[in-house]
Each structure stands twice: as structure tokens, then as C-alpha cells.
Image (tube, rainbow, N blue to C red):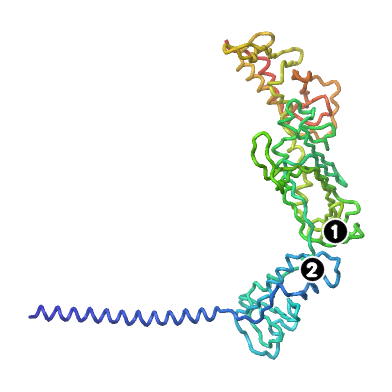
Amino acid sequence: MAKRKKKTTLTMVTLLLALAFLIVFYLWYSNREETSGNEAESKAKITLAEIDKNNIQQLHFQNKEVNLNLYLEGEVWLSQEDPNRPINQDKVDNLLNVIDRVEAERLVLENPEDISEFGLDEPVLFLEATSKDNQVVSLKIGSQTSTKEGYYGMVNDDPNVYLFSNNYRTGMDYRDVDMTEKEDLPSVAAEGVKHLTITMREGDNFELVNDPDNQISAPGALIFPWIIYQPYEEGVIADTAKVNEYLGNYASLVYDHCVNYQAEDLSDYGLDQPYATIHIEYEQTNVITLEEPEVNPETGEEIKQKTEVEDKEFTLLIGDQNDDGDYFVRMVDSDAVYVMDASDVENMLEVDVFAMVSKHINMPNIANVDHITIQVEDSSYTMEIERNTITNEEGEEETEEIYYYNGQVIEEDDFKGLYRRLISAAYDAPIKEELDITGLKPVITISYHIAESDKTVSSSYLPYDESFYIVDNGRKVRFYADKRKIDDIVSAVVVFKPSE
């Protein structure tokens, strides 16, 4: 009997606890729904004005730097003050998106006596739109709140002050120069550049030419098609990877803003006598969609698109720097003067020419070389490749190569190992002063005879000091070679012993 009573009591306690839990849960859930509803209500924006942006015909936009009256002519927005001024249509479209539906975060104060407390007596931003049917919507933006949650503002003739999100300020925070349309600068792909010249008002000029048929690097022109002609007027081979890295500066050039779209006195910007002139000739590849597909006569496949290569060029003039350190610039065939970021300009003009020079002094393809003469002081050494056409066991013709060192047949690996040592000779530093090499006797001279062109490519290494040799290629001496590396080549030639 006692056990039954105890069990009944336990059951009732459990039920009471469950009931209490349900009551607490109900109160919490009801309060949660009410709170959520209040939050949603507090977050609901207040729509104060609407106007169809497609019907807007006039805009008045004003801030501390801009006071523009714009009107729509066809599909283009123009300035009433100066219809010839090219207006930035994207910026106007952003203004239309601001004014077409004006929404406040909340009401701040009804009909205040002194709107100057909110910065609305002299608003920092004003925008007014007028539609074709003379509907007008105006928006004033005043001071930012102390909590920086937004800006005070007023709409139309409504006497109340509202809170607007920060987006209303950023959406209209344009300078006068931002409202002028910028011309597009060409985007130049590195692989399309054929000729680049930088002419400086002071200092060395720079000239770079892509010439696969050049005779300076022959027979390695396909590997080294780039030649630096200025400041090395006789021409120096350039490193292709370094050239492409530098030319990457021309792939995405942009103007910051336009300062004068119809400049008459270029001396105001230092463009009457430019600090620098950049001229580029390049090829632009265009993919053309054919109106009527063609048929490939060889494959029978339908051709819907064709690739065309167009020769293009442009000349950019670099003038003085403004107060921010950026540069005034102008395209040679344009009346407009723009500002370009200093880093973009300096990346183009500040060329480390020696870094761009190919450090290989002579690196002819061994397939084109038939013999090499090496003069070490009073001793001569020869390396030769004899090439014969033979018929193999399958009856096919092939080239047999026989390798010689000082007239003795040696193994291919021995020959090519020494050849690799020879072509490892490299420029190490530029010569910065005028040197007279008259009477200097070379420590070593290496001459490669190119079979197909019957051309000999030579380089001599003249004593200078404990660290360097002077490199003499038969043209103006411009570079040093590391003495230790050249001495290693000399040793490799003198002590060379073919494997048994």
C-alpha cells in the first residue's frame, strides 16, 4: 500500500514539473514572437518618395565640390552649364538609383525648429530629380549622427528630419572631376608589343624592339627576339621573361580622373615639353563573328568566327606632378588632360635596363654551330662537330654527328659538357664609366662559327681588376663578367681531358 502511494506521489510531481516547463516555454515563445515582430517593425524602412528613373529628364546635383544641372538629350546626360563637357554616364546612373526610391531608416524629429542642428540648413549633399510630367523629388543630406549609424536628411517639402543609411552619402560622394567622362586607355598585351620607345626630357631614353629576325642574337633569335637599342644604341639582347614582366605594366592602364577635357594651354600641366613620351606599336587580336558562316576547304568544318590581327599604336605624354604626386598625362591625339597614379607612371618610366638585359653573353644553339675556336693567351683550342648524312638500317636518312676536341674524336657527352661551360659566360655588372681597352690582351676569346649563316659570334674577356673582366663583343664595351666564373671556363678548357 505504501509503495503504491509513493508511486502515485512521484507521478504527480513529474506531471507538475512537465506542466511548469510547458508554461515557461509558452511564455518564452510568446515573448519571442512579440520581440521578433518589434524588431522587424523597427527595421522596416520608411518610403518617403518614389519616381520612375526612366522618366527623369533633369537632375540637380550639389555638394561641396559639385554643382551640376544635368538634362537628358536622347539617351545621353549633358551639363546645362557646358553641354560640350563629356559627362560620366555611370555616375549619373548611380544618382538615379539613389533618387528613384528614397527610404529612411526611421523618423528622428517631427518639424524641428532649428534644422541647423542636423546640418540641414547647409546640406552636404543635395539631389533633385524632375520627371517628364514635372514630378519633383528632392533629397537633402546633412550631418552624420554621433554614433555614425547614418545621416540626417529631409525629403521634398516634408518638415520632418529622418535618419538615412550611410549608403546615401557614399552613393553621392563624387568630386566634380569624377563627373567628367574618362577616355579609355588601350590595354596592351605583352605578346602583342612590337616596338616601345620612352623619350625622356632628361636622362637616358629607352627603346625595346621585338625582332625575331635580328642578327644580334642569331641564331638564337627565336629564343631571344627582344633587343634593347636605347640606351645601348648598337643593340643588346634582352631577357624575354624580364621584358614580359615589364610590359605587364601596360596591360591595365587607367586614368584617375580628367582635369581638363579641352586643354588649350598645355604648359599648365607640363605637357608642352613633356617629362616623358611613351610610344608603343603593338598588334591587337580581335575575334570576329561572321555574319554568314564559311566552310574550311580542307576539313569541311563550318567556321563561325575568325581571328584578325590589327596593327595599332599610341603615344602617351607624361607631364608634371600635381600636389598629390600624381602625373598629368595626355594622349597625343586628344585634347583632354588626365591625372594618372604616380605608381603606374613610375612603373613604366623607371626601367632597370641592366636587369632586363639577357645575361647570356653568347648562347648559340649547338645545332647551328659547326666549330668553336678558343684562344687562351697564346694557346689555341678547337672544338668541332662533323655532320654527315647516313642511311640507317631501316633505309631512312639521318644525321650522324662526330665530335672533335683539338682534332681528336671525343664522346658526345664530353663535348656537350664543355660546351655548356663555355656558354655559361654571363654579364655580371654594367660598366658605368668610359673605359679605354686599347692594348689590353684578352685572357680568353671564344668564337662560335654558325654553319648556316657563315657567321662567327665572338667574345673576349679583358683584365680589369680582382673581381671583374671586361667583356668585349666587338662593339662598345658595356659590361663586366665575374672573374671567378671566367677563370673557371679557362681552367675547364685548358685541363680538359676526354673520358677514355
Give me the C-alpha separation between circle 1 and circle 2. Answer: 24 Å
Q: Would you say 164 lies left or right of 24 here?
A: right
Residue 61 figure quarter:
bottom right
Q: Residue at x 68, y 87 (%)?
A: 158
Regarding residue 412, the answer to whether it shows in the image is: yes
Q: How many marks?
A: 2
- Residue type at tag 2: Gly
Label 1: few (<14), some (14–19) or many (≥20) C-alpha neighbours in 10 Å: some
Residue 293 image position (x, y, % from top left): 69, 45
* Of pointers 1 and 2, the one earlier in the residue sequence: 2
Residue 311 image position (x, y, % from top left): 80, 43
Q: Would you say 440 lies left or right of 100 here?
A: right
Regarding residue 62, the answer to whether it shows in the image is: no
Please identify the quadrant where the C terminus is shown. Answer: top right
- Closest to the camera, between mark 1 and mark 2, is 2
In the depicted structure, whether residue 389 falls above or below residue 98: above
Q: Which residue is mark 2?
A: 74
Q: Would you say 275 lies left or right of 305 here?
A: right
Q: Which residue is mark 1?
A: 336
The disc label shown at residue 118, or none: none
Secondary structure type for disc 2: loop
- Residue type at tag 1: Ala
Secondary structure type for disc 1: loop
Label 2: few (<14), some (14–19) or many (≥20) C-alpha neighbours in 10 Å: few
In the depicted structure, whether residue 412 falls above or below residue 139: above
Residue 142 image position (x, y, % from top left): 70, 79
Q: Residue at x 68, y 73 (%)?
A: 98
In the depicted structure, whether residue 482 falls above or below residue 411: below
Residue 231 figure quarter:
top right
Q: Residue furthest left?
A: 1
Please identify the quadrant where the N terminus is shown. Answer: bottom left
